[in-house]
Amino acid sequence: MTKYAIIGAGPAGMNAIETIRRVDSEGTITLVSDEDPYARMALPYYLADDIPREQLATGSDDYFAKLKVETRFGSRVSSLDTGARSLTFDDGESLAFEKLLIATGSSPARAPIPGVDGANVHTLWTRADADAVLAGAGGDKPSVVLIGAGFIGLIVLNAMYKRGWRLTLIERETRILPRMLDRRGADAAEAWMRDRDIAVHTGCNVTEISGDERKRLALSNGTVIEADQVIVSTGIRPNLEFLDGADIERSADGVLLVDAHCESSVPGIYAAGDVAAGPNVLGGVKATHAIQTTAVDHGRVAGANMAGAEVEYDGSLAMNILDVAGLHMASFGEWSDDSDVTEVWAPARPVYRKLVWRGNRLAGAILIGPIEDTTMLTDVGMVKGLVQAQTDLASWKSYLQEKPWDLRRPYVASGTAAALLKRTVEGRPATPRGYTHEGRQPPNQRSPYHSDLVDTRPEGFENLPRTPTPGIYKS
Ligand SMILES: Cc1cc2nc3c(=O)[nH]c(=O)nc-3n(C[C@H](O)[C@H](O)[C@H](O)COP(=O)(O)OP(=O)(O)OC[C@H]3O[C@@H](n4cnc5c(N)ncnc54)[C@H](O)[C@@H]3O)c2cc1C
């Protein structure tokens, strides 16, 4: 009987235990995490009051009992002995293992600003952080300053926007979303936010945060801003302190280097999710894509290999999809490469589409447009598919250069859907996760725009806001 240990009950760890159990019904599985399991990426929905707090949970006693998983929640791993194959916990106890998965995720890194640890200055990474921000709001509509305009920062900002809070965004770089959008996309998003009363300051630092209840923020451009709460979203660092001194290969950024089995340099020790740098679907050097989808894939690949079912990972894809105040934004892969691109730009809407070519294949893309534009949601999926499958589009490349709006024909004709359907992470079709909140599945909410694809138009369809004829967007 194999003894498995998993550290971290985020999406990587949870998908690993489910996969191990599908392959090995006998081995003992111990899941250790300093938090009980909940969905970090659902925190914005809780913050926005879209879902109740209980629905953040991703596992229950019942669920773990069914999977025959022993849990150790509220416990931190303080060291790993790779030679003796044992873990030590912060209470001094230890656990021996044969196969280990490190899936400890990341934590927010607070920029070194004087006053950044003061009252009413938060990060928004954990459920406790979200509780603290909501408690601080006290049912009112507080003014909040968000420091850092990255992907996570803007997800959080959008949740607060839905609550009607008064918002200011500060970004040190000269544009927002510097690791997700190019200059044109970022400027369009910034203008959209300003039009919706979100104050945006770019190209400046916060030099000091002062005040107790009411906060005062001094900016490097001389501006002083007052606010009820401050949220700091200035980057992340991997939770790997317990590896200090351990003989295991790490990247220059400090994350664990893993192969296509998600196995680290130490046989039998695997890593997954935010703490791992593994194969990139676009090739090149190993990459860390600190997003939910990579954590899920890594967890499944690691779990299968730990249990003895040999599975090779194709690689993760850099991908960010975001909604801020009704503007949809998505970017994939090598979106910043400008050597061979097809672009559509309609500033008034705004609509922006950038397809990045590598030969006849799509290496990346940016898509931006108002949420009610029907093509946005479906095109996002097709573009992601074309990048992920690395379809050779052959003559469809020139078609797309001519008609960048018409993704459906190249997508279907090139067999991309079929190629993607054949691909599976574990060599078998995925099955839905076993866990349901209080036995209930979430309702299936279908967008009214779904009708556009399947031609079953709902009542009042004619009155829905529409995108004008795509052709007029050609620059
Ligand atoms: C507000 C927010 C919104 C997000 N939205 C999105 C989104 O829309 N799309 C998307 O793709 N991604 C999103 N993400 C990112 C996504 O949630 C992470 O990439 C994902 O959770 C990483 O999964 P993981 O399993 O690697 O780690 P985690 O989910 O971080 O889980 C790791 C667990 O291990 C525990 N742990 C750490 N160290 C130890 C230790 N020494 N001992 C014991 N336990 C330990 C941690 O406390 C944590 O509970 C969001 C993140 C945040 C914070």
Image: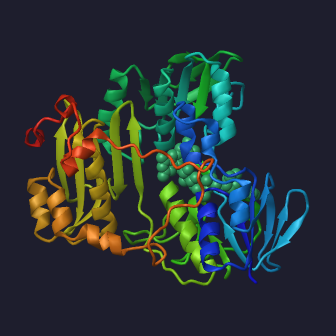
The residue positioned 63% from the left and 34% from the top of the image is 130
- Seen at 52% across and 37% down, the residue is 45
Q: Residue at x 40, y 55 (%)?
A: 319
What colouring style does the render use?
rainbow
| Quadrant of residue 98 within the rendered picture | bottom right
Instruction: Residue at 48% x, 24% y: name it.
Output: 168
Q: In the rendering, at what x and y percent does residue 99 appear?
A: 71, 77
Kindly indicate the quadrant of the structure image that contains residue 458: top left
Left or right: where does residue 25 sit relative to residue 96?
A: left
Residue 171 placement, left or right of 185: right
Could you say which is closer to the camera, residue 472 or residue 421?
Answer: 421
Q: Decide: is 165 above or below 437.
A: above
Question: How many discs mark residues in the rendered view?
Answer: 0
Q: Can residue 402 be seen by looking at this rendering? A: yes
Quarter of the picture holding the C terminus: top left
| Quadrant of residue 138 within the rendered picture | top right
The quarter of the rendered structure image containing the N terminus is bottom right
Q: Position of residue 120 (x, y in %)?
A: 68, 25
157 and 371: which is toward the camera:
371
373 or 289: which is nearer to us? 373
Observer-nearest residue: 428 or 389? 428
Q: Is residue 324 left or right of residue 6?
A: left
Residue 253 visible within the image: no
Residue found at the very far right of the displayed protein: 92
Please say if 8 is above or below 300.
above
- Give residue 327's position: percent from left, percent from top: 33, 35
The picture places residue 171, in percent across and down from the top left corner, at 47, 34
